[in-house]
Image: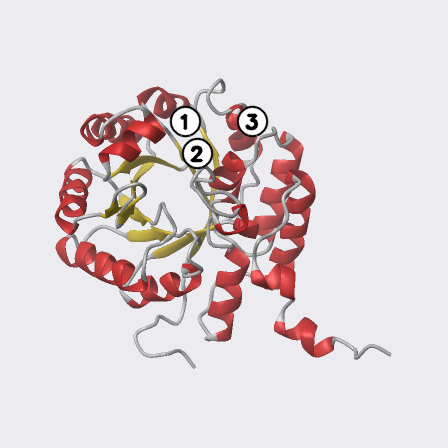
Amino acid sequence: MVFGGLPTSARLVEVGLRDGLQAVSQFVDTDHKLELLHRIVDSGVTTVEITSFAHPKVLPQFSDAERIVEQAPRRDGVHYKALVPNVRGAQRACDTQIEEIGAIIPVDREMAAKNQNSTPEQLLHDFTAIVDQGHRSGKKVSAAVATAFFAPCRGAVDAAQLDAVIERVVDAGADSLYLAGTSGVETPNEFYDGVRRVKGRHPGIPVGVHLHNRNGFGTVNALASLSAGADWIEASFGGLGGDMWFPGDPSVLGNVPMEDVVALLDSLGIETGIDLDAYLAMVRAGERFTGTPSYSFVSRGGTRQQLADAQWPV
């Protein structure tokens, strides 16, 4: 049974190999990344953000971006995307076989300055060039609209500011966009209203959401977004990633754990196509390769079936 207003199926996008590994200080071996990617795809995930084309001096974690794209397993129905921080990064990505590129555009001016040493206006200008570059190379281009609802060190983001950025992104020719809960304190109402408003104003463009988990609302925000008509949900294995420099305990600062999202949707009869047991085996491999434990409930507390199969202590 599916609760009213929720879909019978949902598309989940794995971002751990990019947004997750970006938060890991040490370089994760390329072969380990590729093993995780194989496991992710084998578990049933069909859309994966696999790397970033940031400058290697800025993010050495992705100095192997071209190799990752070249050696990624090619499967029918599996779609790969990569983050590009600027026009130069887009040029690098367009020289590879990546199917989709995406750029981050914060609504909040201070976040744009702190995170990208730029302004929303400059990033929107650059995004037009990135769209042109991508489309000439046969790539899909998406926009990550960051701090969509709440900005650290400032507070709630005015809806008119968000709408203005969305208008510019759509006018630039984006093939899709997603609303990013950058801080992790966004509420279900914000995601529900935001997704509904964007889809109402721009019915022809797919809209996803990118969820962080600081306030523990990540999975609830996923349900609110799906109820509002979101076309996909982004999450990361083990809850890895996010903007870890914000104040707070690292165990709650990351992305919403994909395995918790899958477990919740499974419990509601919402089909994801992801085998939770196979996915959890990948999460355990990710823990070994990154040295970071999973922050998810299901990996730490066990699945419903594991608890049913447990034996009372003798």
Nearest to the observer: residue 141 or residue 295: 295
Q: Which residue is mark 1?
A: 93
- The answer to whether residue 208 is seen in the rendering is yes
Say whether residue 89 is left or right of residue 124.
right
Secondary structure under the numbered disc 2 in the rendered image:
loop
Quarter in which the N terminus is drawn:
bottom left
Q: Amino acid at mark 1?
A: Ala
Q: Which residue is mark 2?
A: 98
| Res 81 label | none
Say whether residue 139 is left or right of residue 247.
left
C-alpha gap between disc 1 and disc 2: 7 Å
Vertical arrangement, residue 161 with respect to residue 128, above or below: below
C-alpha gap between disc 3 and disc 1: 11 Å
Q: Amino acid at mark 2?
A: Ile
Q: Which residue is mark 3?
A: 67
Quarter in which the C terminus is drawn:
bottom right
Query: Do the residues bearing badges 1 and 2 touch, measured as CB atoms within 8 Å?
Result: yes
How many labels were placed on the picture? 3
Residue at 18 percent of width and 35 percent of height: 172
